[in-house]
Image (spheres, grey):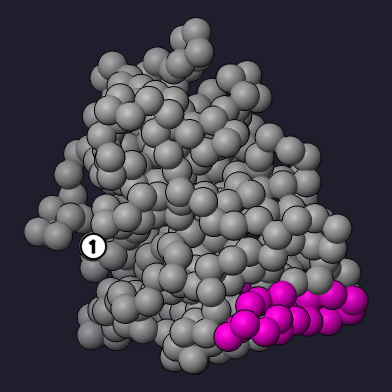
Amino acid sequence: MMRQPGIALLLNGCLLALALSGATGHCFAASETNTSSMSPVEERQRFGDETLTDTAGWSDLLNTVVGRVPARSGVAVDKIRKIRVKSPGSIPAGSVEASGLVWDTFTHSYWLVSDESGALFEMSAEGELLQALEIDGLEMDDAESISIDQQRLFIAGSVSVNKSGVLKESRRKLFQCARAGRGWRLERELDLHRLLVDLSQTKSVDMQTRSYLTAALRQQAIDIEAHQVRGDSLYLGFKAPLNSLGQVVVLKVDGLEALFSGGPLQASIWRSFKLHFNGGAGTMALSDMFFLDDRIYLTGVNRGRTNPASGLWQMEYARNRITSIRLFAEYKAEGVAIGPVIGELTIVFDGGGKTESRYVRIPFN
């Protein structure tokens, strides 16, 4: 069993160890899934309605945990802090509902996307918004994820329908940007919705993957909240729908470079898993993922609308093992990335438009 740093939650003024020190880390297996044949009613229950229901077993725990993030031994306890605007008036207050971030070693700053703005926001290591960058030709609505790969920046829409049940053009794209000085310019784009439709109808794609995508498209249940580009592969993390076993799905699409020019389709379900916390029965919905060497760091949010709690997990994907790390009460973790300090992760929290977005830097082993 891998040894994890000691973690504690502040419960009603008392520190309760979460038994992640020593040999008692809580690990769960990730797996591939088999999609069974379901009726339309069963599909709606799995792929639609279930994603809006509360998760049994969370309420008592979540109501007692306060929003402080303890650090490992020898590192000062950090707090969840508000994201501030460096020059008041330069960026409208409340205009940033942080939904994803990356750390840029070239500018030595973060780039944030907001699900309520088409702009790209630059944030300092100290949590100050430096600028709102409008990229010519990039029309984005509901930007949910961002990734950086060498000199390329990728921004993806959720591919989800709006409250009126309409999938807008600006929600269905993956944008690739290239550097332009300290900023970015649009280089090309890919229609993610068209890609998923084509994959669901391509016989060279395995039946399990096609069945999942076919049901998701039929029910208009797709919500992509996470992505990463690694080399020539695109990983798409689905907040919804869950698969037939109630698991989060990550799809791997190969040959990304060729796809931009209409190349052959190659994809499969790469991993499927549940985001448990501390061995509980409840499962959170994926909100972001970040690859680091042989691990992935994942954030998930409570699937109920009444409690915005969220969590952080580490996956050793070669071993199909997930370890729960942190639980954030009353905060909605929407993005995770490496930070400016070696051995730290940065997480952003969406304020939902009612309060400022927030961030925290967390040491990890």
Instruction: Choose between 43 and 208: the one closer to the eye.
Output: 43
Q: State the quadrant of the N terminus.
A: bottom right
- Picture residue at 59% right of the left edge, 57% below the top: 79
In the rendered image, is residue 256 in sight?
no
Q: Position of residue 187 (x, y in %)?
A: 40, 17
Give the amino acid type for the residue marked by disc 1 in the picture.
Answer: Gln
Q: State the quadrant of the C terminus.
A: bottom right
Residue lying at the far left in this picture: please name it.
164
Looking at the image, residue 221 sits to the left or right of residue 85; the answer is: left
- Picture residue at 58% right of the left edge, 19% below the top: 107
Judging by the rendered image, the residue that carries numbered circle 1 is 220
Q: For numbered disc 1, what is the local secondary structure?
A: loop
Instruction: Choose between 350 and 57: the one closer to the eye.
Output: 350
Q: Position of residue 271 (x, y in %)?
A: 60, 62
Residue 135 found in image quarter: top left
Magenta range is 8-31
Residue 9 found in image quarter: bottom right
- Picture residue at 20% right of the left edge, 55% below the top: 161
